[in-house]
Amino acid sequence: MNEKKAHIIVISNEKGGTGKSTVSMHLAIKLMDEGFHVALVDTDGRQGTLSRYIENRRQFCKNTNIKLPIPELITIAPTEDINQILESRKQISQQINNLIPEFDAIIIDTPGTKNYLFEEAHKFADTLITPISDSLIDLNVISEIDFNNPEKHHAGHYAGYIWEVKKYLAAHGKSMLNWIVVGNKISTFSSRNKNQVFYYLERASKTYGFRLAPPIRDRVIYKELFLQGLTVLDLSRDGLKHRLTVSHLAAKQEIRNLAEFICPN
């Protein structure tokens, strides 16, 4: 049996549209820039956003003859045959286990709804990163608040699920899950709604056992770069010749902050 090598980072939220694939890609490139050998696992293979991101990057490199860091990619789509789910679970587990001794970090991007691929991914987590928007709907998956009586709250369905994941991991010898919640696609404008979300997230962090990372702002550049398979970290590379704006520099710093936040104090 090979001794475990890779640190496994699961990017997950039981809700779509929170920017999981963008976070996965940027974090992978950041770690590669730091000299780590990184693999990506796209368990949302039916939608395949992360896989398309990598394909766009490969095509960009081919078209421009510019060499960029590209992580190893495995794409996994769920089986449609209910009778094959057990066998598919075993195959997925084996695929991830095969990567562990070969890489320094494995980043697993998950579907926005819970299925067996979603569940298998969480079983491997050393670090769990949950992107969340500044929306009370997003807050609800972690902490359900009675706004007529804000002192009354209970775990949202995703926080409840992560409690079960923590118990599973503890039963299998992993005593601590490094759970990080990061505000993603956050508006640059102050609003009562946004302030409420982060106020309640700060309180929920103490109850449900996660750390709240510095937020990542909503920037058009992320959508533009996806089409080329690029990240904000690529903009200053030789050959790309992008003029860096204050917004670009701030975006790069936000990704650096998230990468550094992975290591608990």
Image: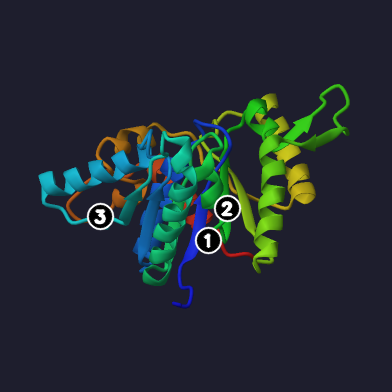
**218 and 168: which is toward the camera:** 168
Q: Amino acid at mark 1?
A: Glu
Element type at mark 3: loop
Task: Identify the residue at image location x=52%, y=43%.
Answer: 116
Q: Which residue is mark 2?
A: 128
**Residue 14 falls in which quadrant of the image?**
top right
Most extreme residue toward the top is 148
Q: Amino acid at mark 3?
A: Arg
Q: In this orientation, does residue 176 appear?
A: no
Q: Which residue is mark 1?
A: 260
Element type at mark 1: helix
Q: Which residue is mark 3?
A: 237
Q: Earlier in the sequence, mark 2 or mark 3?
A: 2
Task: Identify the residue at image location x=40%, y=51%.
Answer: 41
- Please provide percent x and percent y for residue 220: 39, 31
Q: Earlier in the sequence, mark 1 or mark 2?
A: 2
Labels 1 & 3 near each other (Cβ < 8 A): no
Which corner quadrant holds the N terminus? bottom left
Element type at mark 2: strand
What number of labels is visible? 3
- Please provide percent x and percent y for residue 69: 27, 58
Q: Is residue 112 above or below residue 109?
A: above
Labels 1 & 2 near each other (Cβ < 8 A): no
Q: Amino acid at mark 2?
A: Leu
Dot in front, 2 or 3: 2
Task: Identify the residue at image location x=67%, y=57%.
Answer: 168
- Whether residue 55 sits left or right of residue 123 in the image: it is left
